[in-house]
Image (cartoon, helix red, strand yellow):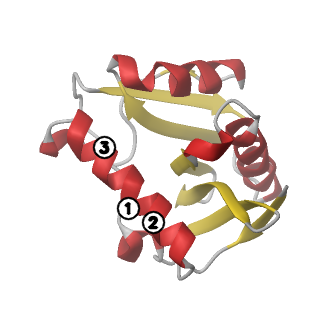
Amino acid sequence: MDIRIDDLSHPAVIALLQEHLDWMHRISPPESVHALDLDALRGPDITFWALWDGDALAGCGALRQLDARHGEVKSMRTARTHLRRGTATRMLDHILTEARGRGYGRLSLETGSMAYFAPARALYARAGFTACAPFGNYAEDMNSVFMTRTL
């Protein structure tokens, strides 16, 4: 599998991100959807990667700079064809490596509190993330779980 920076223009990437947004809006109340759309993911504070398995898009993920020492995991999504094949772990490992390379001392994330998000929470816990208070511009939300780890 090949992870590379992506400009969010490939139709498969656009479709995967639209699927991600659609699911977030189906599962979470509107005020609790923190997934970013294409325009927001193109922001100067975000680096977005696509993970390719040959010609097939396997997944994606992004890293947002919150400040010079703190980053945020965004838009982690695995294509249905690549579930339970290590895709998310590979992407998260890449983001962790990039965050360390940037000199971040902390990496945080927001994910859902509902059962649908249990696999994501387990993935993050295995990678050393623990529950924390809201960070950045987030506020307490019963539909959100905030996690962080020191790098």
Amino acid identity at mark 2? Ala
Which quarter of the figure has residue 60? bottom right
Q: Secondary structure at mark 1?
A: helix
Residue located beneath label 1 in the image? 18
Amino acid identity at mark 3? Met
Does 90 sit above or below residue 113?
below
Residue located beneath label 3 in the image? 24
Which quarter of the figure has residue 26? top left
Which of labels 2 and 3 is toward the front?
2
**Marks 3 and 1, Cα distance to the nearest angstrom?**
10 Å
Query: Considering depth in this image, is 35 or 52 the residue closer to the camera?
Result: 52
Residue located beneath label 2 in the image? 15
Asked if disc 1 and disc 2 are in contact, CB closer than 8 Å, the reply is yes
Q: Where in the figure is residue 35, as x and y percent of width and height? A: 36, 52
Amino acid identity at mark 1? Gln
Asked if disc 3 and disc 1 are in contact, CB closer than 8 Å, the reply is no
The residue drawn where x is 70% and y is 50% is 104
Q: Tally the numbered discs.
A: 3
Residue extending farthest left: 30
